[in-house]
Image (cartoon, rainbow, N blue to C red):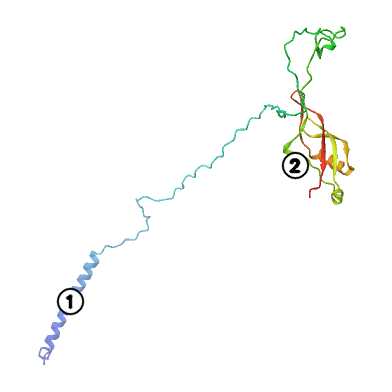
């Protein structure tokens, strides 16, 4: 009996042929794919890139601020003359009578008596010369800015005993308005006098007196009363 006569032989040969054709077609497809796919070549040579290389360039820092140099101030060489205080009106000021036009004979040169007298020489028997007016003197006055410092402290012992007192004092007012010296004229008690003396030398301030408009050192008399107010 031959293979052709066996049942199913013809069908098996047909299947084998189809399988062989499919395998051949598959192999051809794989080969074609390998041919068409680009091959990446790895080389040891350095890669040269023709593009731009980016790098950070530090910005130039702004200049530090410079402090302005102050020009030295020129020293002032002006000399200021203190203005004497304006004389205050005073009832005790001397009033100078007005000077009228007179026929005056000039004094002889070198005559020692001619400083205060204008006219004939002294010793001629008649005093018909014209005397110069006395200087204008204004007495010191208490400075109102220091009025609260004039009253002395009340002596403790006298205050406890309820005793009141009075002091009459003479003070020498310097040209700067301060008290330079004090003298007791009268006092009801030594304690009141001591309190007044201390206060006058330490705290009293005056508007200085003047002589012909210029500050002048002068004495002035004041009365200080010590009174207990109920």
In space, the residues marked 1 and 2 are separated at their CA atoms by: 135 Å
Residue reaching furthest to the front:
230
Location of residue 140 by image quarter: top right
Q: Nearer the viewer, mark 1 or mark 2?
A: 2
Quadrant showing the N terminus: bottom left
Task: Establish if 157 lies above or below 29.
Answer: above
Residue located beneath label 1 in the image: 22
In the image, residue 104 lies at what x, y percent?
A: 76, 8
Q: How many marks?
A: 2
Relative side of 161 to 5, left or right: right
In the image, residue 109 lies at what x, y percent?
A: 81, 8
Out of 220 and 182, give the one closest to the viewer: 220
Location of residue 20 by image quarter: bottom left
Location of residue 88 by image quarter: top right
Task: Establish if 170 lies above or below 230.
Answer: above
**Quick one: label 1 or label 2, which is nearer the N terminus?**
1
Residue located beneath label 2 in the image: 148
Task: Establish if 225 lies above or below 216.
Answer: below
């Amino acid at each position: 009996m031959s293979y052709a006569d066996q049942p199913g032989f013809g069908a098996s040969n047909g299947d084998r042929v189809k399988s062989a054709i499919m395998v051949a077609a598959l192999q051809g497809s794989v080969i074609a794919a390998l041919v068409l796919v680009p091959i990446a070549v790895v080389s040891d040579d350095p890669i040269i890139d023709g593009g731009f290389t980016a790098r950070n360039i530090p910005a130039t820092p702004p200049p530090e601020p410079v402090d302005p140099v102050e020009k030295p101030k020129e020293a002032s060489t002006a000399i200021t003359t203190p203005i004497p205080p304006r004389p205050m009106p005073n009832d005790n000021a001397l009033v100078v009578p007005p000077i009228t036009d007179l026929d005056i004979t000039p004094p002889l040169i070198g005559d020692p008596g001619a400083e205060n007298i204008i006219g004939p020489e002294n010793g001629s028997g008649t005093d018909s010369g014209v005397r110069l007016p006395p200087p204008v003197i204004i007495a010191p006055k208490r400075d109102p800015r220091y009025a609260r410092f004039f009253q002395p402290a009340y002596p403790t012992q006298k205050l406890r005993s309820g005793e009141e007192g009075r002091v009459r004092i003479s003070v020498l007012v310097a040209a700067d308005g301060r008290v330079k010296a004090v003298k007791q004229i009268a006092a009801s008690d030594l304690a009141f006098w001591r309190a007044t003396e201390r206060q006058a030398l330490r705290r009293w301030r005056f508007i200085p007196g003047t002589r012909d408009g210029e500050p002048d050192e002068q004495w002035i008399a004041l009365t200080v009363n010590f009174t207990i107010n109920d």
